[in-house]
Amino acid sequence: MSESVGHLPHHGGPGPHEDRRPGLPRQRRGTSPQGFGRYPDFDILEQADHWDPVTRRVVLDRVERVPPIRLFDEREAATLGAFCDTVLAQDREPRIPVLAMVDAKLHARRLDGYRHADMPSDPQTWRQVARRLDEEAVRLRADDFAAASQGIRDTIVGRFAAGELEWEGLPVEKAWSVVMRMVLSAFYSHPWAWNEIGFGGPAYPRGFARLDAGEREHWERPAEFEVDPVADVKERGLE
């Protein structure tokens, strides 16, 4: 969709909005975005008992307590929700509630502490992006971005990512970086995304260890690491 992701390998899998069954197996344990992933027998939430209580509550809240939309109005939420689903190729349930997580952060003013001198605040940048996306959709004969076909959404988002849109008063490449920074941060902070990529979850208090070849020969795998997602994906020829 953009040059920033064009280098990533597909390993013979489907395109951004195609059925994932030909390329990825259905998740068998736990949940992954849309129910498919490279590590179908990996569920990071099975490790929750190893986390300290504060970490466990923070992570579980991301699944169990999805925040309501409070900053964006109904139309902005519809447009920005469609945008998040498009850039993340979340075409079906279960979806990670990225926009709700972004909205909660913006509403609480938990910002990064910096911004481009020629850009509005992050909340206003998001609102302007919503309005400009709707305007682009109207130019392509859709009612708005949320109501547009997937093809129209892909076209608009592709041009947005490439910096090809001309939005007066809003530097489009910087706007893309602002919204995508928050989109990706929200997505990859969610345990469903950890299942999809085989991430081992919070390192504290148990920690991670990198062993050389000699150490690995004499290391007994703890029971909680019964499924090695890296070995599993290699055995199935996906890497």
Image: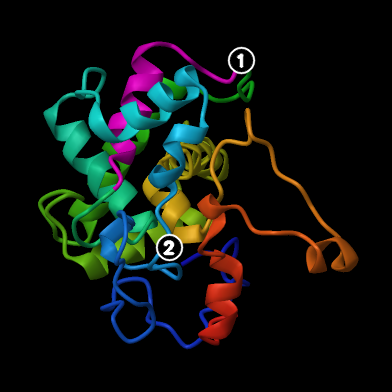
Residue 13 horizontal/vertical position (percent): 42, 83
Residue drawn at the location 25% of the way across and 51% of the way down: 95
Q: Residue furthest top?
A: 108
User: Which residue in the structure is indicated by mark 2?
Assistant: 158
Color theme of the render = rainbow
Which picture quadrant has residue 186?
A: top left
First in residue order: circle 2 vs circle 1: 1
Q: Closer to the camera: disc 2 or disc 1?
A: 1
Which picture quadrant has residue 89?
A: bottom left
Residue drawn at the location 26% of the way across and 18% of the way down: 71
Residue drawn at the location 53% of the way across and 74% of the way down: 232
Residue 210 horizontal/vertical position (percent): 79, 53
User: Which residue in the structure is indicated by mark 1?
Assistant: 113
Residue type beneath disc 2: Gly
Observer able to see residue 168: no
* Residue 38 as seen in the image, left or right of residue 218: left
Q: State whether residue 227 is above or below residue 44.
A: below
Q: Residues within 10 Å of mark 1 (few under 14, many from 20)?
A: few
Q: State whether residue 3 is above or below residue 52.
A: below
- Of the pair 94 and 133, the residue shown nearer to us: 94
Residue 5 horizontal/vertical position (percent): 56, 64
